[in-house]
């Protein structure tokens, strides 16, 4: 690959053992996340609930070397230094030919399973403090994405404002919220995200607990779940578009992260068909002029992906400006240390200006690198 500016829109830290012990509010220390050592495996627990899968959140490169060694279990002793130390993280980016990265959590992705909203909010605040600190030595190379709990939208809005004040570059919200995203209670939140220029992310794994859910079954998805995992973010995007969120807040950006790409063209087509042809669509929300749901998608939605060859083939149905490559480092399914090799393969035949946008320019523009 020519010397493009390669920026990962989706990389990760690995939460160190004492993160919450050091950062969480004292009143929640006993109920907040802590690490259990169980023989050869470690397990995170929060307010009595087990969460996280330490094995699959490390093992960078193992799928290329010896895939039979991939495991869901794991220990903090084997976590790569790049997951817990910003200096090592940057060295690994250099090794992988990646200039900069946007950082998400690992174990904390599944904290949204914790039923108690007060414990969840306290845990996410502590995580945000840690991640802002993690990125601070490399402000031009590492950008932090805050975690928000929107059970109480006003409280989540205040945390968004706090994250922005700490220099964080965006925020993630649950792919399966307690309150659907077409509810009017979110108005101030959307307005704040737009005004602060804070892109919002719907990242894989962030399913919010709801009454009646068996939270013990959320730890690992079954094989059948993975090919259908984009169902939840599709619901979120549909709710936002048909509620007119992007018509009222035209500069708001929302991303679907780590769900790959090729689901999007069909989804966009079906939204337009519903809007134009079906009775409920015809008599529901009407947009100004000839605007279609897919138009809002192309303008306001971004998609983070790793190596979706089919999605790249269909990139013009989505819009090249919507596509943001990410390495997913240091997770087991990530592209490290072969990111440039994989980009060369999946972008073979793509015009040079489009390649430059997909591998880095779109991310640089969105997150102000």
Image (spheres, rainbow, N blue to C red):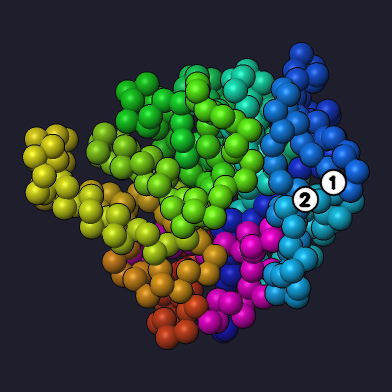
User: Against 128, is 25 above or below?
Assistant: above
Circle 2 — which element?
loop
Q: Which mark is residue 357?
A: none
In this picture, which residue range is highlighted in magenta? 319-345
Q: Name the side, left or right, on which 329 lies relative to 9.
A: right
Could you say where residue 89 lies in the image, as x and y percent from the top left? 77, 58
User: Against 16, is 185 above or below?
Assistant: above
Q: Residue 73 carries which label?
A: 2
Instruction: Tell me if residue 130 can be seen.
Output: yes
Say whether residue 344 is magenta: yes
Q: Name the side, left or right, on which 257 lies relative to 11.
A: left
Taking the spot 23% from the left edge, 57% from the top edge, the residue there is 269
Q: Nearer the viewer, residue 368 or 112?
A: 112
Taking the spot 83% from the left edge, 29% from the top edge, the residue there is 22
Taking the spot 77% from the left edge, 36% from the top edge, the residue there is 44
Do residues under tags 1 and 2 come within 8 Å of each other at their CB atoms? yes
| Residue 239 falls in image quadrant | top left
Instruction: Tell me if residue 138 can be seen.
Output: no
Circle 2 packing at 10 Å, graded few (<14), some (14-19), many (20+), is some
Could you say where residue 193 lies in the image, as x and y percent from the top left? 45, 35
């Amino acid at each position: 690959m020519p010397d493009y500016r390669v920026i990962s829109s989706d990389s990760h830290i690995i939460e160190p053992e004492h993160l919450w012990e050091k950062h969480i509010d004292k009143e929640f220390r006993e109920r907040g996340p802590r690490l259990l050592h169980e023989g050869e495996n470690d397990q995170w627990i929060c307010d009595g609930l087990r969460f996280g899968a330490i094995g699959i959140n490390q093992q960078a490169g193992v799928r290329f070397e010896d895939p039979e060694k991939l495991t869901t279990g794991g220990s903090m002793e084997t976590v790569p230094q790049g997951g817990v130390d910003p200096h090592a993280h940057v060295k690994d980016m250099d090794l992988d030919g990646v200039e900069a990265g946007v950082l998400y959590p690992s174990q904390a992705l599944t904290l949204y399973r914790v039923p108690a909203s007060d414990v969840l909010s306290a845990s996410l605040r502590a995580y945000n403090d840690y991640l802002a600190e993690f990125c601070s030595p490399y402000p031009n190379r590492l950008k932090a994405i805050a975690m928000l709990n929107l059970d109480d939208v006003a409280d989540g809005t205040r945390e968004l404002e706090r994250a922005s004040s700490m220099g964080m570059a965006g925020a993630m919200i649950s792919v399966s919220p307690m309150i659907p995203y077409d509810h009017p209670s979110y108005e101030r939140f959307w307005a704040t995200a737009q005004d602060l220029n804070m892109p919002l992310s719907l990242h894989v794994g962030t399913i919010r607990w709801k009454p009646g859910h068996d939270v013990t079954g959320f730890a690992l998805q079954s094989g059948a779940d993975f090919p259908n995992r984009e169902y939840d973010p599709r619901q979120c995007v549909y709710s936002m578009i048909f509620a007119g969120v992007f018509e009222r807040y035209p500069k708001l950006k929302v991303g679907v992260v780590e769900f790959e790409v090729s689901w999007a063209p069909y989804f966009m087509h079906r939204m337009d068909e519903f809007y134009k042809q079906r009775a409920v669509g015809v008599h529901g929300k009407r947009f100004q002029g000839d605007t279609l749901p897919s138009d809002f998608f192309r303008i306001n939605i971004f998609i983070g992906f790793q190596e979706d060859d089919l999605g790249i083939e269909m990139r013009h149905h989505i819009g090249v400006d919507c596509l943001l490559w990410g390495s997913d480092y240091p997770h087991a399914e990530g592209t490290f240390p072969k990111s440039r090799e994989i980009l060369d393969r999946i972008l073979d035949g793509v015009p040079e200006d489009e390649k430059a946008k997909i591998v880095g320019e779109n991310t640089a523009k969105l997150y102000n690198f």
